[in-house]
């Protein structure tokens, strides 16, 4: 199928690519210079018609589902299933008043760009490498994630665009806008014309059809107001924003994509150039951000959002509309304000629905350590969508191949349906309950059960709801909503609900900021909303830390270390502080929770994954390694592969060969030793706020050391440069990665990469203080001896604030033949037709194939440099350029890390700046030597 821009799909004349613009090996228009902007993606109407050769299915009819099928109706928000009437056909042409201009408006719109597809030759080469054919469900069960995707890179409203023109007008005329309900302000938009802007002013949701501005434009073009309020990572969040003009575009009624979905709104230029304003200057000890937030809350009237009775279940539409508006802005304060309004509406009518609302906002269904997760495969979702809408699978797949967002496809498929007996609205509590049932379904018929429950949700969903239902089921909400923003909004909403918005003593902003800090700290120590939210509802943030605290069985995220470039830098940073250095073991982080004097043991990974089934040997031995007085303990450690005969530790690669599930103690071939280095909890008392000296003493008093089973991390306390360098050499010879430097007087800081812990790795002598955890995003076909495998890979890092993967380097050297084959075999099942919308890349370096972000590789590099090609941390050091790593080489595959654990943009910036400081110091030292010689 010919690839054309989404923005031009419904227009009568799409502007073709200029001569000579085609990318090598590609047969379509080039992508934007930086690739699709990894910006927030709003859902929009997608008109989907069945293929002409399947006219019998073209009349979309919702299935009849009996109450006995799947979960009970109340589990999905009291959804009553009803037979749907045949869908009305889309009008052959849009009404004249709503028609889009044949050409983009001059000066205000740029021609839409598309992402290149693989060439015929590339497809042929790829075909030789593909494994035996699998069914979609087999690929899904294997985690293939290979469904195609094309980035759509323009913003789009949800509720209004999903409707036909006439319905859209009625909606705008008959109900107050969500923007007005939240204080009379409409989120920013990249509207293509003054007419669209005027409609925004009148209360309609913003629309942007074909405007395209790139991250390479000067940051000066961003208004001062935008910069003052911009998010620290404001390039978007991972799925590009879709925009649309409010006029209906004319064109082929059988077209699959929505109008105006192909252009991108500029975000990248405003990134870290706005960091100072985003964080907020301090004014009498209170951040200006908090002051601005207080002002926003005073203006907003959350009551306008309430259209349900007090005590009644809160409709899911409240969250769907809030998500829509969040996707429209990159400003952290606006995002928090939108959430606060929604949360206050819930608190004012049905507070018990606040907990399920929080879970839906963070796209989870249960605490992380329970292992209950969503992440439904695309094949299952496509089948469910077909059942729910009556569309044939071919038309759904075609729409998905072209658009790359099943949420958009879901809304489009639903938009042509008309129900004779519409089911009751979805509710927040009902949707979460349905998600939990779907996540926990098991057994031989679990796939059918899951699909049935999904169908019920989709049939009941209205307007923009199907899109967010589908995205949530995929665990890919991607609207730029960071969990920290949810925590701040939760704190502010509860405080305002209890105390009101009137600033009688001029200290409201101060109290809001204090409440947010308390809530964030409480969640870091007790990361479960099941405890946090009820505690907040009971007594606000007052004494919250005493009611919501660390407890065995609920893992905290580990404290992490920052990289450093040498012993001299350590001594400089810790000039006036006592510190110790420990071996940094090359294994897997293990947070061990022991309860009931050893009767109950839990072992959690750095991601709060329950690894207890993976280590039955550790569980069996721990009871005998506790001192008699120990009833409960939580300690931090590293699980390391061990050779009991040679009595030495083994590399991480050996540990990674150990089975992860259903491990039988008698069949274990890779022995493991635990190296304990910190005590977080002991006999009913949290140790998190104790200094390291006390935590270490508690650890040594609680455990019994036994070689090859449980040992303490080797450490040394000294300020002598020569002694520290010798200890570093010893650590390397012992098979570790180097040293961790820790201040003795500081506390344990969960989930923070703290400056109180520094990594001093053996690699620092080679120029870069740390290795990089990168995600393979694309592959380049090998030539010559490498024919049949990938000869090189496009690597990326992850930016958690924007939820985007940003390219950082191309890896093509240092592979053995075995590695090339193994890596190709591991990545081949994850090939996708187009880069995901949340990938940030350059047209100057386009791989032959793209991969889903599924793997993490550790690489070592010579140094870091500013790059006009790569997009890692773009805008954070240079307003339009990213940072790249030079001469990378593969160290190992990190099976213990998820793609979201890859090196972050902020870490890359820290390492780049640290490297620059070292180079300046070396240059200054050399200059002094030269001057002395003269």
Image (cartoon, rainbow, N blue to C red):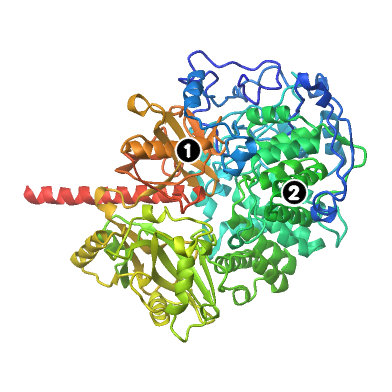
Give the residue at x 45% y 51%.
895
Give the residue at x 65% y 71%.
541
- Which residue is at the front of the view, 283 or 365? 365
Q: Is residue 10 left or right of residue 28?
A: right
Q: Is residue 432 visible?
A: yes
Above or below 904: residue 756: below
Give the residue at x 61% y 17%.
15
Q: Is residue 865 left or right of residue 107?
A: left
The first of marks 2 and 1 along the sequence is: 2
Name the residue furthest top.
19
Q: Position of residue 275 (x, y in %)?
A: 50, 49
Q: Quadrant of residue 837?
A: top right
- Which residue is at the front of the view, 739 or 62? 62
Query: Dot 2, how many residues are within 10 Å of its Cα: few (below 14), some (14-19), or many (20+)?
Result: some
Q: Position of residue 245 (x, y in %)?
A: 71, 29
Name the residue furthest left.
934
- Marks 2/1: CA–CA distance: 30 Å
Q: Which residue is mark 2?
A: 449
What numbered label is drawn on residue 593? none
The answer to whether the residue labelled 2 contacts the one labelled 1, judged by CB atoms less than 8 Å apart, is no
Could you tell me which secondary element the residue under label 2 belongs to?
helix
Q: Which residue is mark 1?
A: 827
- Which residue is at the front of the view, 690 or 879? 690
Q: Position of residue 174 (x, y in %)?
A: 87, 40
Q: Is residue 34 left or right of residue 571?
A: right
Name the residue furthest bottom.
629
- Which residue is at the front of the view, 695 or 249? 695
- For the N terminus, which image quadrant? top right
Q: Position of residue 926 (x, y in %)?
A: 16, 49
């Amino acid at each position: 199928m010919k690839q054309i821009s989404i923005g031009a799909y419904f227009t009568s004349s799409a502007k073709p690519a200029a001569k000579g613009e085609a990318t090598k090996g590609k047969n379509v228009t080039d992508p934007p210079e930086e690739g699709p902007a990894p910006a927030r993606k709003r859902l929009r109407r997608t008109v989907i018609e069945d293929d002409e050769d399947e006219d019998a299915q073209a009349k979309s009819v919702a299935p009849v589902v009996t109450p006995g099928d799947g979960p009970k109706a109340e589990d999905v928000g009291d959804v009553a299933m009803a037979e749907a009437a045949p869908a009305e056909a889309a009008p052959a042409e849009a009404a004249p008043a709503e028609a889009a201009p044949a050409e983009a408006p001059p000066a205000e719109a740029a021609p839409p760009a598309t992402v290149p597809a693989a060439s015929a030759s590339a497809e042929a080469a790829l075909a030789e490498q593909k494994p035996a054919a699998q069914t979609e469900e087999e690929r899904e069960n294997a985690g293939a994630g290979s469904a195609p995707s094309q980035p759509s890179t323009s913003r789009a409203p949800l509720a209004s665009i999903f409707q036909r023109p006439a319905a859209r007008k009625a909606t705008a005329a008959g109900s107050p806008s969500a923007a007005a309900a939240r204080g009379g302000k409409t989120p920013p938009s990249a509207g293509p014309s003054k007419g669209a802007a005027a409609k925004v002013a009148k209360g309609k949701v913003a629309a942007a059809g074909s405007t395209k501005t790139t991250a390479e434009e000067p940051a000066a073009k961003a208004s001062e107001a935008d910069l003052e309020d911009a998010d620290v990572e404001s390039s978007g969040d991972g799925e590009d924003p879709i925009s649309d003009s409010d006029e209906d575009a004319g064109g082929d009624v059988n077209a699959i994509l929505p109008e105006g979905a192909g252009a991108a709104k500029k975000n990248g230029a405003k990134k870290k150039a706005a960091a100072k304003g985003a964080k907020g200057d301090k004014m009498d000890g209170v951040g200006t951000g908090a002051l601005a937030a207080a002002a926003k809350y005073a203006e907003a009237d959350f009551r306008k959002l309430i259209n349900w009775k007090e005590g009644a279940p809160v409709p899911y539409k409240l969250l769907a509309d809030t998500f829509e508006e969040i996707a429209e802005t990159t400003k952290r304060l606006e995002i928090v304000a939108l959430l606060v309004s929604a949360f206050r509406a819930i608190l004012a009518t049905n507070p018990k629905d606040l907990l399920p609302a929080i879970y839906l906002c963070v796209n989870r269904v249960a605490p992380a350590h329970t292992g209950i997760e969503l992440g439904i495969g695309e094949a299952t979702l496509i089948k469910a969508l077909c059942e729910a809408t009556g569309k044939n699978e071919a038309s759904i797949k075609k729409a998905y191949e072209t658009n790359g967002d099943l949420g958009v496809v879901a809304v489009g498929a639903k938009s042509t349906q008309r129900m004779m007996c519409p089911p009751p609205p979805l509710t927040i509590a009902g949707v979460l309950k349905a998600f939990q049932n779907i996540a926990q379904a098991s057994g031989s018929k679990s796939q059918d059960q899951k699909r049935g429950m999904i169908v019920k949700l989709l049939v009941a969903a209205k307007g923009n709801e199907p899109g967010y239902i589908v995205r949530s089921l995929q665990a890919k909400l991607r609207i730029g909503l960071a969990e920290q923003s949810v925590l701040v909004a939760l704190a502010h909403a509860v405080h305002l609900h209890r105390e009101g918005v009137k600033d009688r003593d001029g200290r409201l902003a101060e109290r809001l900021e204090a409440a947010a800090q308390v809530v964030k700290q409480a969640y870091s120590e007790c990361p479960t909303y099941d405890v946090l939210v009820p505690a907040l509802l009971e007594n606000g943030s007052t004494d919250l830390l005493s009611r919501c605290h660390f407890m065995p069985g609920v893992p905290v995220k580990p404290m992490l270390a920052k990289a450093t470039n040498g012993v001299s830098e350590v001594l400089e940073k810790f000039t006036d502080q006592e510190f110790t250095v420990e071996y940094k073991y090359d294994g897997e982080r293990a947070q061990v929770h022991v309860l009931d004097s050893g009767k109950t043991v839990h072992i959690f990974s750095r991601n709060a994954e329950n690894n207890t089934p993976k280590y039955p040997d550790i569980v069996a031995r721990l009871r005998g390694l506790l001192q008699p007085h120990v009833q409960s303990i939580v300690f931090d450690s590293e699980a390391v592969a061990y050779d009991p005969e040679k009595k030495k530790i083994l590399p991480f690669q050996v540990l990674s060969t150990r089975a992860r599930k259903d491990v039988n103690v008698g069949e274990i071939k890779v022995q493991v030793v635990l190296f304990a280095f910190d005590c977080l909890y002991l006999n009913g008392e949290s140790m998190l706020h104790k200094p390291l000296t006390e935590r270490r003493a508690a650890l040594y008093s609680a455990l019994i050391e036994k070689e090859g089973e449980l040992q303490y991390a080797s450490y040394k306390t000294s300020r002598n440069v020569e002694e520290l360098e010798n200890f570093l050499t010893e650590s390397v010879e012992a098979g570790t990665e180097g040293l961790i430097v820790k201040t003795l007087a500081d506390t344990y800081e969960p989930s923070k990469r703290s400056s109180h812990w520094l990594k001093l790795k053996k690699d620092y002598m080679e120029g870069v203080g740390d290795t990089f955890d990168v995600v393979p995003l694309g592959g380049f076909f090998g030539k010559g001896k490498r024919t049949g495998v990938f000869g090189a890979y496009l690597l990326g890092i992850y930016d958690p604030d924007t939820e985007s993967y940003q390219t950082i380097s191309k890896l093509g050297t240092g592979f053995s033949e075995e590695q090339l084959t193994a890596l190709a075999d591991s990545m081949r099942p994850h090939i996708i037709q187009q880069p995901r919308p949340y990938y940030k890349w350059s047209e100057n370096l386009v791989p032959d194939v793209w991969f889903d972000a599924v793997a993490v590789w550790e690489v070592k590099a010579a140094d870091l440099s500013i790059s006009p090609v790569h997009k890692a941390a773009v805008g954070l050091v240079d307003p339009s350029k990213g940072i790249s790593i030079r001469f990378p080489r593969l160290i190992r595959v990190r099976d213990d890390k998820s793609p979201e654990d890859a090196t972050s943009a902020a870490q890359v910036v820290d390492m780049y700046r640290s490297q620059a400081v070292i180079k300046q110091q070396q240059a200054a030292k050399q200059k002094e030597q030269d001057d002395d010689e003269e």
